[in-house]
Amino acid sequence: MAALDAGADDYVTKPFEIEELRARVSVGERVVTLQQQLSDRVRALEEAFAHVHQLQGLIPICAWCGQVRNDGNFWEQVSSYLEKRSGLQFTHAICPPCREKESARIKGVLPPHR
């Protein structure tokens, strides 16, 4: 009883019957196999959950500023939203048309950017 209380899963007393030993070893093998199967299924469920947490369905986006509404009903930048849900990382640059517009705005040719 002390061994079971200390964490042992089973025990065999001496002298023992070979049939009993085989049966207990068989039970132990079955327990180990079931534990491994359970571990594999938990891992598969965790991977599936990670995929479910990624982007799915429609994303509400503001037609004026381009921000998106997140799950908490708050608005945030698209890059921030995507980073959190997909593992993507963004670098920032300015595309040629935007660079031309900003250059013209800075020179005073265009009205301020909104």
Image (cartoon, rainbow, N blue to C red):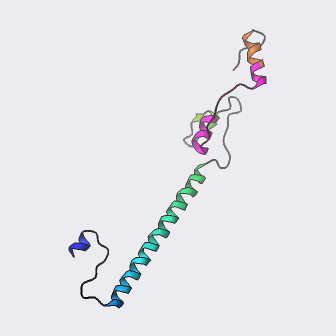
User: Is 88 one of the magenta-colored residues?
Assistant: yes
Q: Residue furthest top?
A: 108
Q: Quadrant of the C terminus?
A: top right
Q: How many discs appear?
A: 0
**Is 87 located above or below residue 31 in the figure?**
above
Between residues 73 and 20, which one lies in front from this camera angle?
A: 20
Can residue 83 be found in the magenta stretch? yes
Which of the pair 59/25 is nearer the observer? 25
Q: Is residue 102 left or right of residue 53?
A: right
Q: Please tell me in which quadrant of the rendered image residue 30 appears.
A: bottom left
Q: Residue furthest left?
A: 2
> In the image, residue 16 lies at what x, y percent?
28, 88
Q: Which residues are magenta?
A: 79-99
Residue lying at 42% horizontally and 77% vertically, measured from the top left: 29
Looking at the picture, does residue 87 appear above or below residue 24? above
Q: Is residue 62 left or right of residue 29?
A: right
| Residue 51 spot, x, y in % from top left | 60, 53
Q: Position of residue 83 (x, y in %)?
A: 60, 39
Using the image, determine if residue 30 lies above or below residue 80.
Answer: below
Where residue 60 sits in the image (x, y, percent)? 66, 40
| Residue at (24% x, 71% y) in the render | 5
Give the camera-side residue of 63 and 13: 13
**Quarter of the figure with residue 1:** bottom left
Position of residue 83 relative to residue 54, above or below, is above
Q: Is residue 75 left or right of residue 3?
A: right
Q: Give the residue drawn at x 75%, y 20%.
A: 99
